[in-house]
Image (tube, helix red, strand yellow):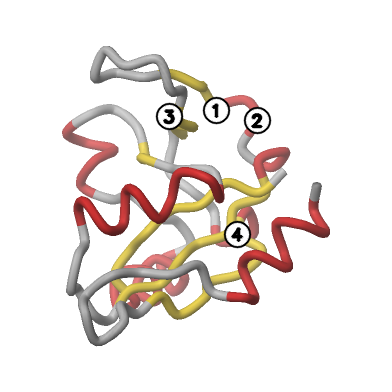
């Protein structure tokens, strides 16, 4: 299955060159915040509304299985995928441009929907 992570394009490009992705959340919270396709738009519209220059990382969950936990750290009942390690670029099967509409809202890019559907 594919899990998703929102990141600034420049940060992802820097991580690819470095051979690992270690966002601030990994240091601060101990994990990388991820979402499913059903969750990502709520996250994007709540936390990134109007932000430009983003990409949506499509992560193969089997490549991060040993460091992946499904949990809700804010006390809710909806479980989110969290990766408790840095990401290697080869665990990311696609990095898709993720730009808001003119209203600042996000929609799921067709390429991401198609990839997630075929990956099961």
Q: Which residue is mark 1?
A: 68
Q: Residue at x 40, y 75 (%)?
A: 98
Whole-percent x, y for residue 103 in the image: 21, 79
Do residues under tags 2 and 1 come within 8 Å of each other at their CB atoms? yes
Whole-percent x, y for residue 46 in the image: 21, 51
State whether residue 102 is above or below residue 13: below
Whole-percent x, y for residue 12 in the image: 38, 69
Q: Residue at x 80, y 47 (%)?
A: 120
Residue 53 figure quarter: bottom left
Q: Earlier in the sequence, mark 3 or mark 2?
A: 2
Mark 4–mark 3 Cα distance, whole angstroms, equals 15 Å
SS of the residue under disc 4: strand
Do residues under tags 3 and 1 come within 8 Å of each other at their CB atoms? yes
Q: Residue at x 35, y 32 (%)?
A: 31
Q: Residues within 10 Å of mark 1 (few under 14, many from 20)?
A: some
Q: Disc number at residue 92?
A: 4
Q: Residue furthest bottom?
A: 102
Q: Disc number at residue 1?
A: none
Number of numbered discs on residues: 4
SS of the residue under disc 3: loop
Q: Earlier in the sequence, mark 3 or mark 1?
A: 1
Q: Residues within 10 Å of mark 4 (few under 14, many from 20)?
A: some
Q: Give the side of residue 86 with respect to residue 7, left or right.
A: right
State whether residue 105 is above or below residue 43: below
Mark 3–mark 1 Cα distance, whole angstroms, equals 6 Å
Q: Disc number at residue 65?
A: 2
Q: Earlier in the sequence, mark 4 or mark 2?
A: 2
Do residues under tags 4 and 1 come within 8 Å of each other at their CB atoms? no
Q: Which residue is mark 3?
A: 84
Mark 4–mark 2 Cα distance, whole angstroms, equals 13 Å
Quarter containing the N terminus: top right
């Amino acid at each position: 299955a594919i899990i998703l992570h929102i990141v600034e394009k420049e940060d992802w490009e820097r991580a690819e060159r470095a051979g690992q992705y270690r966002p601030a959340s990994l240091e601060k919270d101990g994990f990388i915040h991820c979402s499913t396709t059903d969750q990502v738009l709520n996250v994007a519209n709540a936390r990134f509304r109007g932000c430009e220059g983003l990409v949506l990382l499509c992560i193969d969950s089997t490549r991060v299985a040993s460091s992946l936990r499904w949990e809700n750290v804010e006390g809710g009942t909806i479980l989110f995928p969290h990766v408790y390690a840095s990401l290697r670029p080869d665990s990311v099967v696609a990095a898709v441009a993720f730009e808001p509409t003119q209203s600042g809202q996000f929609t799921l890019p067709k390429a991401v929907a198609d990839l997630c559907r075929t990956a099961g």
